[in-house]
Amino acid sequence: MKNSARGRVDPFIVMDVMEAARQIEKLGHEVIHLEVGQPGTGAPTLAKEKVINGLSDSTMGYTVALGIPELREKIADLYWRWYKIKVDPGRIIVTPGSSGSFILAFTGLFDVGDTVGIGSPGYPSYRQILKALSLNTCAIKTTNDNKFQPVATDIIDNNLDGLLIASPANPTGSMLNKDELEGLMEACDRKQTVFISDEIYHGIEYDARAVSALEISDDCFVINSFSKYFSMTGWRLGWIVVPDDYIRQFERLAQNLFICAPHISQVAALGALDSHDELNQNLKTYRANRALLIQQLPKIGFKKFAPPDGAFYFYIDVSEYTDNSLNFCKAILEEVRVAITPGSDFDPERGLETVRLSYACSTSDLKKGLRRLNNFMSNYRL
């Protein structure tokens, strides 16, 4: 039997690293997980309480395709709390994770053969979802000088049907300020390029507040998730905010592609949206972990990095040690049982000289992981 060309996507390497780590854990060894962008905490207490109460009160059947109305209203309230902007709940579509939002956006906005620009390094699943939908990716080679973010000339110089940006970004944690974001959006408007903003790491910021594209214009598509700030990765729940004219088209797609997001997860999200104090405690842990890494990474030998503005990643240049980050990360996992992600996941061209380290774990686990990495590097440099 034949396989479709659209299905020949690359593996998501971080998931392969997770599986390799699981096999080592199966043998009874402890692995320190610094590879995956998953908070070390579970869903907030109020979210779990909502689920317990909801299970006794409901059959957890289908919801309407756009999501539970109460949840969409509470998400709209979040935009007022965080950004002081009013978003009509009718423009909010709840999806099975942010991945569901990307599938809706790419399917609802682009035709086969259209080209979408994404920054490189960038989240690898962007490329693979686009490929599976027979869309073309324009990998914009970003630089440290521009905080590994696209700039306006990248839109002007390329024939793009769409541009997808992420701020804070994965894997670099870099953020666009309001002027930079506005410049990109104005360039897209001039070129009639659809603007999509991945804002799933909003709420996890350090020295400055993340800016939402919706603060600048309603003529854009904004994607967010309950996975990161809200610490609900496995619940698979996200949302997309669309302009008024696109609501019905996206609703029809959601009805047919997903029917609805998981009912139980939507109930949990109602509690998560009221869990500010608990979630901000998680942010204190990320802040402490970030400070620890800024101090300790150079001592280990990892000196080439830019401290992240947001999210919970360090993207590190390891070119003085290896030109194959896949093998480098494999050796670290096998020898000292610390899982980190090779940069080739995020940048197929330059990523063999970089690694990504996630600090979403507990501070105690991070300290243990750093001790193990130091042992590895001490022997590696001999």
Image (tube, rainbow, N blue to C red):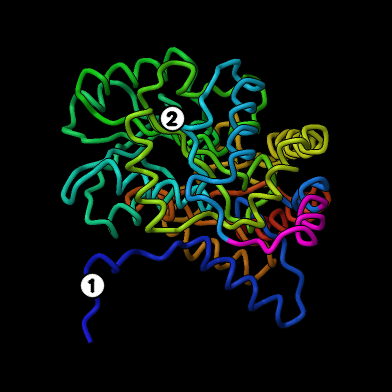
Using the image as rendered, state which of residue 174 and residue 182 is in the foreground. Answer: 182
In the rendered structure, which disc, 2 or 1, sits on the residue that comes first in sequence? 1
> Quadrant location of the N terminus?
bottom left
Name the kind of residue labelled 1 in the image. Ser
Q: Badge 1, how many Cα within 10 Å: few under 14, some, many 20+?
A: few
Residue 53 among magenta residues? yes
Using the image as rendered, state which of residue 376 and residue 198 is in the foreground. Answer: 198
Residue 66 in the image, given as x and y percentages of width and height: 49, 45
Q: Disc 2 marks which residue?
A: 144
Magenta stretch: give its range: 49-61
Residue 27: image quadrant is: bottom right
Residue 67 disc label: none
Residue 32 in the image, given as x and y percentages of width and height: 72, 61
Q: Is residue 9 above or below residue 311?
A: below
Q: Disc 1 marks which residue?
A: 4
Residue 181 among magenta residues? no
Callout 2: helix, strand or loop?
A: helix
Residue at 55% across / 67% down in the picture?
Answer: 330
Using the image as rendered, state which of residue 190 and residue 55 is in the foreground. Answer: 55
Majority secondary structure of magenta residues = helix
Residue at 49% across / 17% down in the picture?
Answer: 215
Residue 86 in the image, given as x and y percentages of width and height: 55, 18
How far separated are the C-alphas under marks 2 and 1? 37 Å
Name the kind of residue labelled 2 in the image. Asn
134 left or right, relative to 185:
left
Q: Is residue 226 above or below residue 19?
A: above
Callout 1: helix, strand or loop?
A: loop
Q: Is residue 240 above or below residue 257?
A: above
211 left or right, relative to 286:
left
